[in-house]
Amino acid sequence: MENYLSVPDSKLKEIHSYLINEYQKFKNMNLKLNMARGKPSPEQLNLSLEMMDVLNSSSDFNSRDNVDLRNYGICDGIPEMKEFISELSGIPSENFIIGGNSSLSMMFDTISYFMIKGAGGCSPWGSQEKVKFLCPSPGYDRHFAISEYFGMEMIVIPMTETGPDMDLVEKLVRDDEQIKGIWCVPKYSNPQGITYSDETVKRLANLKTAAKDFRIIWDNAYFIHDLSNDGDTLLNILDECKKAGTENLPIIFFSTSKITFPGAGVAFMACAGENLVALKKMYSIKTVGFDKLNQLRHLRFLKDKPTILNHMKKHRKILKPKFDLIIDILKREFLNNPIIKWKNPNGGYFISVETCSCCAKRVVELCKDAGVILTDAGATYPHKNDPNDSNIRLAPTYPDRNELKLAMELFCVCVKIAFIEKRINKN
Amino acid sequence: MENYLSVPDSKLKEIHSYLINEYQKFKNMNLKLNMARGKPSPEQLNLSLEMMDVLNSSSDFNSRDNVDLRNYGICDGIPEMKEFISELSGIPSENFIIGGNSSLSMMFDTISYFMIKGAGGCSPWGSQEKVKFLCPSPGYDRHFAISEYFGMEMIVIPMTETGPDMDLVEKLVRDDEQIKGIWCVPKYSNPQGITYSDETVKRLANLKTAAKDFRIIWDNAYFIHDLSNDGDTLLNILDECKKAGTENLPIIFFSTSKITFPGAGVAFMACAGENLVALKKMYSIKTVGFDKLNQLRHLRFLKDKPTILNHMKKHRKILKPKFDLIIDILKREFLNNPIIKWKNPNGGYFISVETCSCCAKRVVELCKDAGVILTDAGATYPHKNDPNDSNIRLAPTYPDRNELKLAMELFCVCVKIAFIEKRINKN
């Protein structure tokens, strides 16, 4: 494997011809593969098939407190489900609101609440001149879409190996009252798989913000989604905030979307102090209650901490070989030809690669033209605008191994073609 | 039965002593009954028990289009469910967004959308000086709570036998640009059970509003919830609006809460034109999709129009005797003693009574002190403020017949006591 960085242009042109030939072979295969979204595979969904049997017409539908869960009521979640999720997360059960099937929807509701009603005794975000939000990037496109929907100015915060660049975060929030919050995927971040270090969590919990209504949106989507036996550990931000006297800062979210079924899971949010009172009140006006039978179904299937952690091991057994396959191919193709960098995550749903500057869009386009859909280049940045046009998010979970191998081999060819095109056009 | 209106005070005082004695007997029974909310009874919930069997671990979870409904995707509802609800409602399937378990939540999302984004090319409601909403009253307390949450000024519109007082509605909206909408429960209105006449629906569809961003919130909660074989008929407002060129006016809501399970049903909304585009977009940002397995579960259980209408007959068989019981007791106690008026609805979940002026709170208080919870007096008006303090909403669906009989007998005693207290104190 030659290192393109030290190969003369004339030689690169030769290689390019060869690669185009290889690329054409892929095209002739009429591939139709998708590595765009973090979707569990059918095999993973089948791990929860038995959940479809735990409730049937002869089941007891009463809660422990003898409330018929088929009927109206219990707006913030059934108590035994709160205890289950409390044991699993280390967050006290009284801090939880249990929702429908979408934690994203609860994030949207939360931002919407602050837009309409405000926080920290300040006027509603929506009535202030401007609302800015910190967006650690690359990050989750759906977070940025919510900020965009609400008309926020998004400020890109570079990611480091230990989480968002906290020096920059601290500096910005100290001086700018218009900065009202930060989007965080603190464990196995989307897309890089970075877990925030203890120091990062502590610094977030101790943020000195000019805004009295600053909030941390803590989307802990991959909280038990490890790819190895000793997964990363993440400090409990609510604990850290309580110690720091900032319990009003964080609002925490997660769900069973990638534990049971993305289309029919249960979402959780947890917060404290004024947030908890306000958001419970909001939900009591918004709904008479979320789907409690689905909460019951999940509880009876997932049972307790050992059971759910064992269930996650089964996911890992399916996912780990797919991640390994990608990493192995990347190593084989690029270890001695460093025109691309990647991270090997301990968990989560993605592998993030950095192509050379101004190559990502071209790689995604080449793949698409050969029948492999990747996440849009740029999608991991606010307004879908990656300033370097270099980040690509690979989502290895949905395709089977054979498909994944093909898709990755095509991807590698496309990365090489894009690099050479770029180099040659530049010179 | 004496007519209190023509009995002298001295005699009323005697009757009062007798009634207090009767009331004490009820108190001694230590009743604990609840007629406050429109909750289906356990017997009604059991009508849908078999829905808990239609999906199990060996089910096919694919949609007709071969989409695995356990996974992410299909934000606005599965196509076959849209066709089912289209056949039932007469609204084209392409006008639907199918949601989670709560139509109230979708109304909240809709109002929230207009607050944040606006309608009809106007600036967002939230950025306008004032937003006023028309509130036909007595009406549904949770609608008024949403208006209150969003800081709207609520304007009481009296209800007539054919729906809201349309002369007043037309007059108000023609001149006042700040009036942005109206809450409607057009069939078997909560609490009076009034169905809007064809003329009322047509006049609503042809409203000339000063506001370009006026919207009709059409909560058709009781659309197939008849109490007799020939239920009321309601014009299809979307059809009428299309004829009138006002398809952007209505946003229609209903759900299966009182068809299957209130705690785990499916909610529907339907709209057209700019609303449909805007609200679909909003939901595509708010969520990756609602619970599609619960949509599938409902579809496979409720099947088609004949099946669901037959299912509603079973509800009717349980509900009709309860409504009859209440009406019979009211007739027996008050037909010749007209200190109270009531409506005998053809469907819905409530019986609305009008006590004499300034008696409702006292009646509810007396009942409560004897162990029977009624809907709070005033709850059927904006800000829980019934200007006459006369409307009481009776919810006969949840208690069994024996409980209902006891509760109603107590209620009648309390109505009489409150009337006499009021008369004697006034004179």
Image: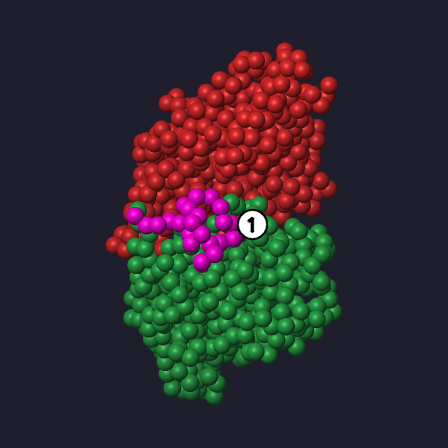
Chain colours: A green, B red
**In terms of depth relative to the viewer, which is nearer, B145 or B335?**
B335
Residue B115 vertical position relative to residue A222 in the rendered view, above or below:
above
Q: Position of residue A417 (x, y in %)?
A: 43, 75
Question: Dot 1: within a 10 Å radius of its alpha carbon, few (fewer than 14), some, or many (20 or more) residues?
Answer: many
Task: Say left or right for A133 vs B223.
Answer: right
Q: Residue at x 49, y 35 (%)?
A: B29
Q: Which residue is mark 1?
A: A283
| Nearer to the camera, B388 or B18 | B18
Residue at the spot 62% in from the left edge and 58% down from the top edge: A275
- Expressed as whole percent of the image width and height from the top left, the position of residue B148 reads 65, 41
Horizontal side, residue A409 vs residue B375: left or right: left
Q: Residue furthest left?
A: B58
Is residue B199 at all visible to an observer of this figure? no
Q: Secondary structure at mark 1?
A: helix
Q: Position of residue B327 (x, y in %)?
A: 47, 22
Measuring from the top left, give residue A129's x and y in whole percent: 73, 55
Kindly identify the residue that appears in the image at 46 percent across and 67 percent down: A87
Check the image and name the residue furthest to the top.
Answer: B6
Image: magenta residue range? A58-81
Can residue A64 be seen at all in this image of the molecule? yes
Q: Amino acid at mark 1?
A: Tyr
